[in-house]
Image (cartoon, helix red, strand yellow):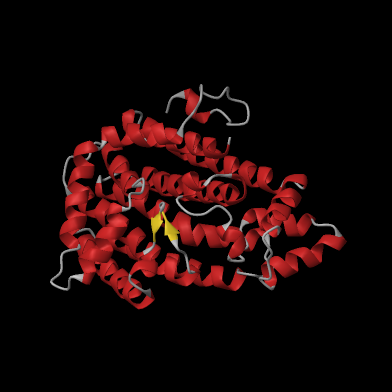
């Protein structure tokens, strides 16, 4: 890898006006033909004579999204000079797994906005969203089988199980002001990072990468996934709706113990503890409470330290890429990590 990628993010001079959207666009450009093929696979798998299925699935697909996870699969495969077409099936499977979890998540969380649009559960209902989510999952597994690699099937099916474990673990932390840093990182590792890791790992496997390089891509995805989620956590208290694809403050209103809240509760003064119990544990909030929460977090560096933690995981992701071949795809994967931090710069 070029030396610049191994340089600490704390000491390296930042590139001029780093922009995550630009990094995504660059990677899309490198993968344009592959992404077109992935989208065609996704649309084909969503066909059904039951009209509600393609309606709901199409709503989710057409709502946009950066396609980061499938691009990890495609770029990982291309980084190792893969010239087949099974990476297309696997990338489509990864996106379908992600889509199914979003449909289920929005029901569990009672979310009303996803990527700036109304969620499927709001438009069609909870039962419909859950059942179509199950259908989308089935399409993902059909694609994994079609790729014809048992190890990839094992990796992505395990990732799907870990995601479900993460969802359940998150339920145990919701509204629980005793949640620790370690427990919350466990949630992020399972709920978000597992699919990032599986996506990159699958691409390396299908391309025939050596075991050390396979593991490096898996760990790259894992660390990038944690960093990406932590930035999202911070943005819920310091961002804008356009940055998130949802309403700022949704995590707060839902009583989620994200890392800024974990830090803020741990650092709160004795007289402030009842505030956090009321707004998080009891869910009794006024219109002024979100602003008060942000004020306390800012004073106690809860948002800043969440971003700092994300930077540490980003550094780990970049270090893993040192074990991958040099080239445009590896550089683009590195740029995703470094510029993702700029979302809260």
The mark total stands at 0
Q: Is residue 333 visible?
A: yes
Front one among 43 and 179: 43
Quadrant in the picture for residue 198? bottom left
| Residue 29 location, quadrant | top left
- Residue at 82% from the left image edge and 60% from the top image edge: 272
Quarter-of-image position of residue 172: bottom right
Of residue 58 and residue 135, the one placed in the foreground of this image is: 58
* Residue shown at 48% from the left, 24% from the top: 3
User: In the drawing, does residue 251 fall left or right of residue 101?
Assistant: right
Q: Residue furthest left?
A: 49
Name the quarter where the C terminus is drawn: top right
Side (left or right) of 291 relative to 203: right
26 left or right, relative to 289? left
The quadrant the N terminus occupies is top left
Q: Position of residue 17 (x, y in %)?
A: 51, 25
Compared with 178, 213 (above or below) is above
Q: Position of residue 103 (x, y in %)?
A: 37, 66
Q: Farthest residue in the front direction?
A: 287
Residue 322 visible somewhere in the drawing = no
The spot of residue 331 in percent (x, y) is 38, 30
Outermost residue, bottom side: 127
Decide which of 106, 310 is in the foreground and name it.
106
Q: Position of residue 37 (x, y in %)?
A: 17, 46
Residue at the image point whose x is 23% and y is 43% from the top: 35
Q: Is residue 261 above or below residue 52?
A: above
Identified at 58% across, 40% down, the residue is 311
């Amino acid at each position: 890898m070029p030396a610049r990628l191994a340089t600490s993010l704390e000491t390296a001079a930042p590139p001029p006006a780093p922009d995550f959207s630009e990094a995504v666009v660059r990677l899309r450009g490198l993968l344009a033909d592959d992404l077109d093929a992935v989208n065609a696979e996704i649309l084909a798998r969503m066909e059904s004579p039951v009209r509600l299925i393609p309606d709901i699935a199409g709503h989710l697909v057409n709502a946009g999204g950066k396609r980061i996870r499938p691009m990890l699969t495609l770029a990982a495969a291309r980084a190792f000079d893969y010239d087949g077409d099974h990476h297309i099936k696997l990338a489509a499977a990864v996106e379908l797994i992600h889509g199914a979890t979003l449909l289920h998540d929005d029901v569990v969380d009672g979310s009303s906005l996803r990527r700036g649009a109304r969620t499927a559960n709001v438009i069609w209902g909870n039962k419909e969203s859950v059942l179509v989510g199950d259908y989308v999952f089935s399409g993902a597994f059909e694609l994994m089988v079609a790729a014809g690699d048992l190890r990839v099937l094992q990796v992505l099916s395990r990732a799907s199980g870990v995601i479900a474990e993460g969802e359940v673990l998150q339920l145990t932390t919701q509204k629980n002001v005793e949640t620790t840093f370690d427990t919350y990182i466990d949630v992020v590792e399972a709920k978000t990072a597992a699919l990032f890791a599986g996506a990159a790992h699958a691409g390396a496997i299908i391309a025939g990468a050596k075991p050390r390089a396979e593991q490096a891509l898996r760990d790259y995805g894992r660390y990038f996934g944690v960093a990406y989620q932590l930035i999202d956590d911070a943005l819920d208290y310091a961002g804008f709706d356009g940055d998130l694809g949802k309403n700022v403050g949704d995590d707060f209103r839902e009583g989620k113990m994200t890392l800024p809240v974990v830090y803020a509760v741990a650092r709160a003064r004795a007289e402030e503890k009842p505030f956090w119990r009321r707004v998080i544990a009891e869910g009794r909030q006024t219109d002024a409470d979100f602003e008060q929460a942000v004020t306390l977090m800012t004073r106690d560096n809860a948002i800043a330290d969440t971003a700092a933690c994300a930077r540490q995981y980003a550094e780990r992701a970049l270090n893993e890429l040192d074990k991958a071949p040099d080239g445009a795809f590896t550089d683009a994967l590195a740029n995703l990590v470094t510029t993702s931090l700029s979302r809260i710069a």
